[in-house]
Amino acid sequence: MAIAKLLPSGHPRIDHMEMRHISKRFPGVIANDRVNFDVRAGEIHALLGENGAGKSTLMRQLYGLYQPDEGEIIFDGQGKTILSPNDAIKLGIGMIHQHFMLVNSLTVAENVALGLKSSKGFLTDLDVVVKRIEELTKLYGLKVDPHAYIWQLSVGEQQRVEIIKALYRGAALLILDEPTAVLTPQEVNEFFAILGQMASEGHALIFISHKLGEVMDFTHRVTVLRDGKNAGETLTKDTSKTELAEMMVGRQLKLVPDKAPVKVGQARLMLKNVSALSDRGLPALKQVSLELRAGEILGLAGVSGNGQLELAEVIAGLRPLSAGQVLIDGQDISRKSPAQIIERGLSYIPEERNRDGMIKDFNIAENLILRENNKAPYAKNGLLNFSVITKTAQTLVQQFTVKTPSVETPIKNLSGGNAQKVILARELSRNPSVLIAAQPTRGVDIGASEYLRDQIVRQREKGTATLLISEDLDEILALSDRIAIIFHGEIMGILAREEASLERIGLMIAGEA
Amino acid sequence: MQDFLDWTVVIGILSSGIRLATPYLYAAIGETFGQRSGVLNLGVDGIMLLAAFSSYFTVLTLGSPWLGLLVAILVGGLMGIAMGFISITLQAEQGISGIGVYLFGLGLSDLLFQKFVGTAKAISGFKEFPIPLLSKIPFFGDIFFSQSVLVYGAYLLIPLAWFILNKTTFGLNIRAVGENPEAADSLGVSVQKTRYLTLTLGGILAGIAGASLSIALLNVFQQNLTNGMGFIAVALVYFGGWRPFYVLLGSLIFSFVNALQVWMQVLGVPIPSDIAVMMPYVLTIVVLIFSAGRVRPPAALTKTYERGS
């Protein structure tokens, strides 16, 4: 008996898509070296790999953004050439980009209609579009109001709009490029529930990620790429996080750094009823009180935008307090300038490292002395001493295993992980009293993350009090001695490491417990 | 002084206010299209000048205002395309390339004027065209319905621009490209094509704005005829929050104050003329200060777009 070949959306399904022996070269690099990959209707297939492993290049060839140098792409037994995203869309491929491709000032319906031929000629046919969106939302259980403006929607809802956009264009195969980076754990669950349903109804889904937890929990099959080559392919149920991580990196890894017990010392950073406003002038921090002691790591868990950025900036002196007090080693720094606060022993790894943590066009040596550039031994009588600067930089680059041709290389040429190592080297080599590490491993490879986390833990043994701000709950749990949860600018509670679990924090950061 | 409250004076002020708004409306609506698609064109004034001269010269030599208007449209459109080539294809900084276009228009229009005309000669351009019946309505007829064709056109342009921006696929593309060009591009909307179209349209409208001065309102050309009107038009776009009907409101306020100060001087109201001439400009600055931040500009305004960067 013939199985119905149509998807709920009414479009034909793609039973089997195969990419065979795909090679793609760029000047000086082989991004894909005879890579094989396939996906079937009904499965969520994870494509896993470090940055630069060739995942995006491979998927860009499937979506028509690049053409392969060698190899073939086969849909249900037929070889196809995909020259542009339009070709890909016609074949039934949809791609959901890591950064949403939505226009905030337009409505959901307008975003969906954008670029499509209107049934009313040069006039928009939003009523027709709205009706079709309502059909799709019903068929797939994707709750979204077609008349809402994008800026009114939560991140989770915006993602549903992206899925609707793809379905509207007839997508049978969806490429999801790190789709969960911006979601809360609850939203991640909802999101995968939707994906699961889509798979069971005959869609083929490719999930690009480096989050091992999600790959283990929600996918059916995994293909791992490393250095542009296939590093392994397995059913998810037959593998483990550790095994996948090692396939990605090609060596043994410690996902959780060893933590020697440290005797916690005196309070180094104290926040007393600190309040502050956001850039828009709304209350971002409400009466926040925290205490960090020497030798401890306090993890601050929360969904981005709940006041973490403002908290870090208040401590670093980059944002005025509207009330309260901040003390470092007992000294009030609430009204001090950033330079004076640095002087008191604060080191800060900012969340937006490309914008706030480095000067992209400066070289590594220059970036390494940024906090101390007007002091001996780097400067004397207003003149820079380059031989000292270079020598110090070389030592630090070696000590922190930064991969670079030389210390004169502009920092913008480094990979994310290596650039972050430079920042970490700058901040830790001062042996700070207090370290604020905001999203220290976001977008950084597992290998480099392992190293960065280990360094933060080592610093704790030297008596630094560390405030670790992270959205990655696995990271919070792996590093922290205590965990504070922030929601809407308020501390919802502080848990000792032993009391904390992923589930409990997950509820608290969503304001539900 | 007692004349000041006379009905004819009131009608005069209102009627010239309506008329004076014409070049601002064309130029500002044209600029609105460009800015909604993400391009700030500071060259409006230069385009107005070059089109004003071209249409003036056409009428001077050939006598037909309609032909003059056509020439203004062509010149304006070409200047819009030139601005597009510099800022879209060559990806030059928008603010700077706009100033370049302005200086080019300012200089070339004067050069051509000196070379081919020399001293200002009045021409006979578009005449007042009283609309039958409507122009007979007391009071309103004189103010609204006894103007030149180009004046009526400016006011019809407002709802038309609103309609294009909000109800057509072209308008949807413009708004998308001005907010998030990457998203528009990913859905097959050509950022370059959309921006070229809005700049060409903006150039054409700036051209008509220039012609409305030289062959309808003033019927003359001289060096720097516009006297910075194109820049005021850019300010009016900000004042109007990139929305046609608010641009209309801003243009009217500005023009009525302008008309008021002209009449005050004509009637000999004892204030220094320098102060009087300043009034509309001071008002513009004050209004801009208070309206700043009320509406968010298009997110991609002044940003060049290159795929994959």
Image (spheres, coloured by chain):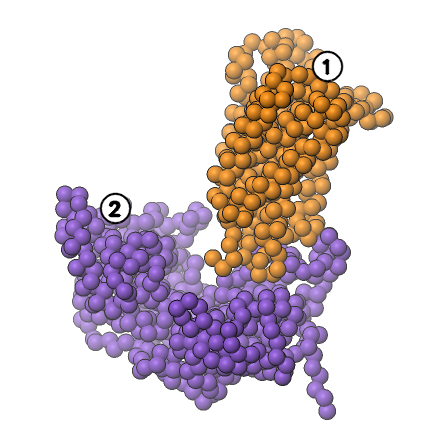
Chain colours: A purple, B orange
Q: Residue at x 70, y 65 (%)?
A: A132
Task: Say above or below: B2 vs A201.
Answer: above
Residue tagged 2: A336
Locate residue A485, reporting x and y percent: 37, 65
Q: Residue at x 61, y 47 (%)?
A: B196
Locate residue A236, reporting x and y percent: 47, 85
As rendered, which of B43 and A466 lies closer to the eye? B43
Specify the subunit that label 1 lies on.
B
Left or right, residue A174 beside residue A444: right
Q: Which quarter of the image is occupied by the N terminus of chain B?
A: top right
Left or right, residue B283 beside residue A405: right
The amino acid beneath tag 2 is Lys
Task: Say above or below: A297 vs B209.
Answer: below
Q: CA distance from mark 2 to mark 1?
A: 66 Å
As rendered, which of A203 and A422 lies closer to the eye? A422
| Quadrant assignment, res B132 | top right
Locate residue B253, reporting x and y percent: 62, 28
Q: Secondary structure at mark 1?
A: helix
As rendered, which of A497 and A337 lies closer to the eye? A337
| Quadrant assignment, res B144 | top right
Res. A37 in view: no
Q: Secondary structure at mark 2?
A: loop
Residue tagged 1: B8
Q: Residue lying furthest right in this view? A: B133
Residue B267 numbered tag: none
Res. A385 in view: yes
The amino acid beneath tag 1 is Thr
Specify the subunit that label 2 lies on.
A
Locate residue A194, reporting x and y percent: 57, 74
Q: Residue at x 68, y 35 (%)?
A: B73
